[in-house]
Image: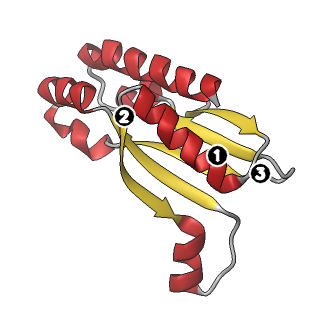
């Protein structure tokens, strides 16, 4: 069972990160956090790792609706989108599957919100 939707992209890593952030903004998401995994591993573990960024994306209106339905949903937010160097020289953009994510809650009132987020993430990936 897959828990992400992804797309491989030719391009420079930093450019793909910026394009991804811009595409998320076009779909109403802000990036609340941006974790540079490569830099963190180098600093904290003295280990080398491929370029890898975790973007914590949040659409405030959809988050509000979700939290109104399920107050504990905040434990699953923000929705993560990762950008990383693929093994073949491409850059991979991968977004969490909102249906899988909110499925953990077992609350069918969240299904329409998950569908909305999923459609927006698909458009983000299609635009890259």
Q: Earlier in the sequence, mark 2 or mark 3?
A: 2
Give the numbered dot on residue 126.
Answer: none
Quadrant where the image shows the N terminus = top right
- Distance (Cα) linking label 2 and label 1: 17 Å
SS for tag 1?
helix
SS for tag 3?
loop
Q: Earlier in the sequence, mark 3 or mark 1?
A: 1
Q: Residue at x 65, y 31 (%)?
A: 128
Q: Mark 1 highlights which residue?
A: 16
Which one is nearer the viewer's eye here, 109 or 37? 37
Mark in front: 3 vs 1? 1
Q: Mark 3 highlights which residue?
A: 86
Q: Earlier in the sequence, mark 2 or mark 1?
A: 1
- Distance (Cα) linking label 3 and label 1: 13 Å
How far across and down, in percent of the image, does residue 112 sit?
33, 12
- Distance (Cα) linking label 2 and label 3: 25 Å
Q: Residue at x 26, y 21 (%)?
A: 107
How far across and down, in percent of the image, does residue 95 sit?
54, 36
Question: In this image, 60 relative to 120: left or right?
Answer: left
Q: Mark 2 highlights which residue?
A: 29
Mark in front: 2 vs 3? 2
How far across and down, in percent of the image, does residue 43 sit?
53, 84
Q: Residues within 10 Å of mark 1 (few under 14, many from 20)?
A: some
């Amino acid at each position: 069972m897959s828990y992400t939707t992804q797309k491989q992209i030719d391009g420079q890593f930093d450019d793909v990160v910026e394009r991804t952030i811009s595409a998320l903004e076009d779909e109403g998401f802000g990036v609340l956090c941006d974790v540079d995994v490569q830099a963190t591993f180098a600093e904290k573990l003295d280990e080398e790792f491929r370029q890898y960024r975790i973007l914590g994306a949040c659409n405030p209106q959809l988050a509000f609706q979700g939290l109104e339905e399920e107050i504990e949903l905040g434990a699953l937010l923000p929705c993560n989108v990762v950008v990383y160097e693929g093994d073949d020289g491409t850059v991979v953009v991968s977004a969490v599957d909102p249906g899988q994510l909110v499925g953990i809650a077992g609350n069918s009132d969240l299904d329409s919100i998950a569908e909305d987020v999923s459609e927006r993430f698909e458009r983000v990936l299609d635009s890259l």
